[in-house]
Amino acid sequence: MTDEIDLDDIETESESESGNDGDWLWRDDIDQSPPGPPDSPEADTGAARNADRKDESVAAEEGGSGAVPHVPHENKDRPAGIPVEGGGSGGGAGRTAEAESAHQETSEDDHQQASGPHGGDADDMTLALTYEAAKRLANPAYVFADAAEWADWLGLVGEVPAHVINRFQREHTIDVDFFSGSGTGPTERLAEIDRHSMFYAERFVLVGVPEESGWAPDGWEFLPLEDAAEKADWQVE
């Protein structure tokens, strides 16, 4: 079994797919309108339209200012991709100043409404056991499996190196989401779980032995192992 990975250390990147809005093929030598009788007004109109297109193409090739097909917009004379307030036409070539302002207000509202680390509601509970408390469990594998049924995230912290915690997990075949020991103490590791952490929840509980009660940082509840074992029906050696 390989070493466990603290999931909070993993950086995720969002990939956005970009595609062409459309690939246009301009054919000036073919009239795409339905053909009419040879001497009908529709035929004359189609011929005139083709002649205009050819004239525009010739003018463009000779350095002239032939018309280029485009969608007219209010800020067409400003550089695209630069914010309106900076003198550009905004994120899109066709976005007006009013549309740009409305877009920014909507983005700010969405950001303020997000209450969890990934834009949703926070989870219910994050539970951490101390290494010392875990060693006193009669069946650590059962306890962690049981806790996983009602806690959203599980952790294991202690004043021991990370490889000691990893070995304990391998020996008892248990998995946790986060742990201490990689250059941080238990209190520091727990304090890192804030609104920016994937383990953020409405309630934080640390289960340990009485002398470890001072490890719980602000926002965390400390629960003695004996009390937790009695409520959860865990066996303690």
Image (cartoon, grey):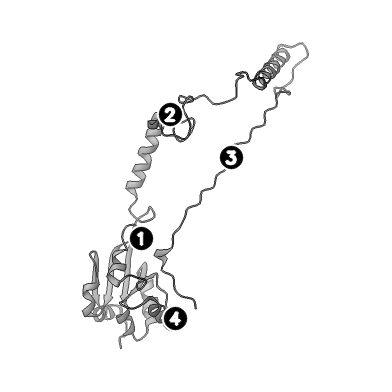
- Residue lying at the far right in this picture: please name it: 38
Residue 45 occupies quadrant: top right
Amino acid type at image mark 2 = Thr
Amino acid type at image mark 3 = Asn
Report the quarter where the C terminus lies.
bottom left
Amino acid type at image mark 4 = Arg
Residue at 22% across, 64% down:
218
189 relative position to 65: left or right: left
Q: Which mark is residue 20?
A: 3
Alpha carbons under labels 1 and 3: distance apart: 36 Å
Residue at 74% across, 17% down:
36
Count neighbours of disc 4 (C-alpha within 10 A) and say few if under 14, some if 14 to 19, many if 20 or more: some
Label whose residue precedes the other's in the sequence (1 or 4): 4
Which residue is disc 2 drawn over? 96
Label whose residue precedes the other's in the sequence (2 or 4): 2
Q: Which mark is residue 170?
A: 4
Which residue is disc 1 drawn over? 197
Vertically, is 236 above or below 115? Answer: below
